[in-house]
Image: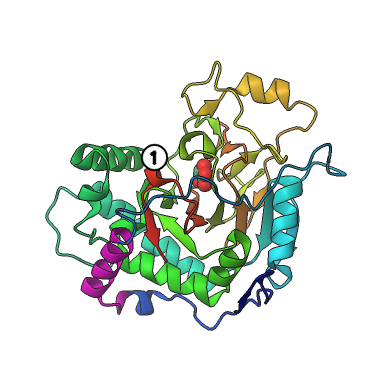
């Protein structure tokens, strides 16, 4: 891909030369992967974001979409223009069948193994594909061991785990994303090479019954003077009335962080505010299929789908990408 004064000149072509199988995953060199992940984290230890990033989504005064919805396209239709237009007009884009079932099955198995290994991390275990945290995880956190322990406890309680706990899984995911054209797409979208984040790259397996997680915009704790894109990959059918928790979303492009007044946390938004302020737009609960890719940024208002009668687990991978110079330092960036 060539970078010219007008930006990146090639549109993204989606490739799929590499698919992730458990055999491929388990044949990786776990020591090399752990070193590599450690180096990716180290690359950002002293790096600070620019104070004045060029924001890739600019506020469009007075522009309202024809209808409030979650726009959908197929993987073959995905390119940077479609992505940027959807995020600017609707706040999100749902790409159907981005990843094939073989990779999805491998990731469900990997998520089970990583989440279980993290929950059981006090039991001594030889380093393996599914658990081998890089040595610098504690020292990179601003409050060191305390912050790492809090982050791990938070994940453990919600059935999730940071991808970097299992560097071989993380490296294999990067390979999978690159094979599907996502590194190029993110570079084009963000206007510079992407980085990822230790804290916001998460393997998720829901716990039932689902507890009421607050409506939120990730910008409330990441900051907003940055460029971001989350790719949320459901690994099984979820949302709507599937019986497995998806995401509830407010299908609108927002440019500000909504007030936390009356909410449970200082970064969340109360139910009554969502139902009052966004009554006309009406929150949606889309149906997601295994291997879809749901893109949104730090202004999108959403929550883990909440109802009391879910009967099925939901697996997902959450991966946030940021500009290499416009990242939230508090989420612990790492190089791609
Ligand atoms: O997977 C979930 O339920 C929550 C995901 C989320 O909040 C996010 O990706 O920002």
- Position of 145 compared to 91: left or right? left
Report the residue that reaches farthest toward the bottom: 17
Report the residue that reaches farthest toward the top: 262
Which residue occupies 43% across, 68% down? Answer: 173
The residue range painted magenta reads 26-42
Image coordinates of residue 137 in percent, x first then y, are 24, 52
Image coordinates of residue 56 in percent, x first then y, are 64, 53
* Residue pointed to by mark 1: 158
Is any atom of residue 120 visible in this view? no
Which residue occupies 64% across, 66% down? Answer: 97
Image coordinates of residue 5 in percent, x first then y, are 66, 70
Q: Is residue 31 magenta?
A: yes
Q: Main secondary structure of the magenta part?
A: helix
Question: Does the closest atom of ligand 1 sit within 8 Å of the Cβ of label 1?
Answer: no
Task: Give SS at disc 1.
Answer: helix
Q: Quadrant of residue 37?
A: bottom left
């Amino acid at each position: 891909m060539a970078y010219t004064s007008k930006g990146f000149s090639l549109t993204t072509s989606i490739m799929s030369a590499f698919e992730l199988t458990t055999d491929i995953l388990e044949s990786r060199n776990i020591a090399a992967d752990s070193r590599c992940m450690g180096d990716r984290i180290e690359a950002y230890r002293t790096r600070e974001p620019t104070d004045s990033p060029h924001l890739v989504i600019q506020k469009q005064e007075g522009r309202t979409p024809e209808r409030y919805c979650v726009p959908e396209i197929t993987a073959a239709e995905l390119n940077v223009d479609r992505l940027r237009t959807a995020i600017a007009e609707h706040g999100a884009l749902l790409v159907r069948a981005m990843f094939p079932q073989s990779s999805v099955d491998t990731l469900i198995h990997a998520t089970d193994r990583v989440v279980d290994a993290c929950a059981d991390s006090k039991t001594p275990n030889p380093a393996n594909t599914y658990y081998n945290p890089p040595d610098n995880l504690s020292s990179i956190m601003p409050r060191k061991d305390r912050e790492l322990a809090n982050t791990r406890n938070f994940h453990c309680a919600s059935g999730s785990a940071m991808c970097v706990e299992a560097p071989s899984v993380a490296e294999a995911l990067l390979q999978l994303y690159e094979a599907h054209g996502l590194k190029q797409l993110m570079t084009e979208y963000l206007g510079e090479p992407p980085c990822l984040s230790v804290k916001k790259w998460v393997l998720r397996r829901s716990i039932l019954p689902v507890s009421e997680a607050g409506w939120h915009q990730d910008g409330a704790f990441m900051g907003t003077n940055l460029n971001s894109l989350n790719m949320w990959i459901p690994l099984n059918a979820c949302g709507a009335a599937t019986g497995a928790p998806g995401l509830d979303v407010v299908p609108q492009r927002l440019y500000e962080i909504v007030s936390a007044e009356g909410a449970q946390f200082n970064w969340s938004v109360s139910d009554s505010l969502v139902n009052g302020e966004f009554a006309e737009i009406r929150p949606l609960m889309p149906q997601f299929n295994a291997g879809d890719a749901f893109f949104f940024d730090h202004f999108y208002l959403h929550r883990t789908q909440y109802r009391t009668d879910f009967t099925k687990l939901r697996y997902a991978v959450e991966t946030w990408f940021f500009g290499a110079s416009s990242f939230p330092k508090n989420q612990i960036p790492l190089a791609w």
